[in-house]
Every structure is written in C-alpha cells, then in structure tokens.
Image: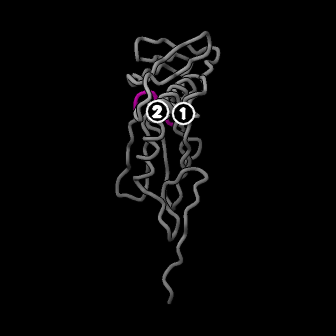
C-alpha cells in the first residue's frame, strides 16, 4: 500500500477540478493545468476531496498510485499558490537583466546568453545577481532553473557560477607552491 497514494487531496477555495475520463484539469488564480492519469488509477471526487486508488494490484498500478497523487497535488498547489526557484550569480561581472519577458545573462562568455521562458513561467530579477523563476507548473520551473544553472555550474576552486539560493558549494584547496 502506498502511504502517499492513500491520502486524499483537499481542493482549496478558488480552485476547480474537472475530471474527463482519465484527464484531470485544474483551474485556479495562477492558471490552468491538465494531465492524463495512467489507466491503472481510478479517480473519484467527493465535494472538495479528490481520491485516487489503484484499479488492480499490479506493481505498475502501485507505482503509479503515489506518483499520480503527488502530480495532481502539485497541480493544485501550482494553480493556487505557484512555485518559485531562486538562483544566485556568483562571480565578477556575472549579471542578469530582463529584456521584455526574456532573461539576458552575462556569465563571462564573449556574448550575452538570452533565455526565452516557456509558457506559464516568468522571470523576476530583484538584483543583478539574483534570479527568481515563478510559475504554476513545478516541472517547468525546475527544468528552466536547471537549464540556467547548467550554463555556468559553480566551480569548486573559486565558487564562481550559477547556483541555487542556499546551495553549498564544496570548495577545493588550490595548488601548493
């Protein structure tokens, strides 16, 4: 039995859920998300509570049970409050700026790197060395944050690069003379 899958999902006020077969559509103040649940999972809605349960007792059904419950819960959280990832730019001359909806980064290359946000994702630059990525889709927010970090990952000798806020970079000692 899945401990995560057994829990019911409570839908907050302002969020509506539409079930169409195996497709779940969630609408809220931050946007609209939809996802198709695997055939091994049955959905049932009772007022403000949504319950997922496996149709049969196969290994795949048990695996998809907890996954499906978590993904639907993340959709509800995304359209009601949203998700956010923060990145820090560490290094001399490393800067971020907004050009319309696009993010323009100076990361020590000979050229600026422009990043176009995917649908439903917005960039906020409170300081030149800080980037906030916001959106309703948790996967899209995390993916674009990983793409930006991969442009210049933090290096272990000076600690320069793009890192998540609060990330600890393991530093190495330099060469001995």
Local SS, label 1? loop
Instruction: Measuring from the top left, give residue 98's x and y in whole percent.
Output: 47, 39
Q: Position of residue 8 (x, y in %)?
A: 60, 23
- Give the residue at x 42% y 59%: 108
Q: Which residue is mark 2?
A: 62
Q: Position of residue 153 (x, y in %)?
A: 45, 57
Mark 1, residues whose alpha carbon is within 10 Å: few (<14), some, or many (≥20)?
few
Residue 159: percent from left, percent from top? 53, 65
Relative to 27, say whether 167 is above or below.
Answer: below
**Residue farthest along the front direction in this orientation:** 57
Residue at the spot x=59%, y=11% of the render?
A: 46
Instruction: Look at the numbered discs 2 and 1 and tell me whether their residues touch, using CB distance below 8 Å.
Output: yes
Residue 131 in the magenta stretch? The answer is no
Q: Is residue 157 above or below residue 82?
A: below
- In this view, the residue farthest toward the right is 13
Asked whether 55 or 35 is in front, the reply is 55
Q: Earlier in the sequence, mark 2 or mark 1?
A: 1
């Amino acid at each position: 039995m899945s401990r995560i899958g057994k829990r019911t999902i409570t839908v907050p006020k302002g969020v509506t859920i539409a079930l169409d077969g195996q497709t779940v559509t969630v609408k809220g103040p931050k946007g609209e998300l939809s996802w198709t649940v695997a055939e091994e999972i049955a959905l049932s809605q009772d007022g403000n509570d949504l319950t997922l349960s496996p149709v049969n007792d196969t290994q795949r059904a048990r695996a998809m049970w907890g996954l499906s419950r978590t993904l639907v819960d993340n959709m509800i959280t995304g359209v009601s409050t949203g998700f956010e990832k923060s990145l820090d730019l560490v290094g001399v001359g490393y800067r971020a700026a907004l050009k319309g909806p696009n993010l323009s980064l100076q990361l020590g290359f000979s050229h600026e790197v422009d990043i176009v946000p995917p649908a439903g994702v917005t960039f906020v630059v409170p300081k030149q060395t800080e980037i906030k990525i916001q959106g309703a889709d948790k996967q899209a927010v995390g993916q674009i944050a990983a793409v930006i970090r991969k442009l210049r990952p933090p290096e272990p000798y000076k600690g320069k690069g793009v890192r998540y806020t609060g990330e600890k970079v393991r530093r190495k000692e330099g060469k001995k003379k």
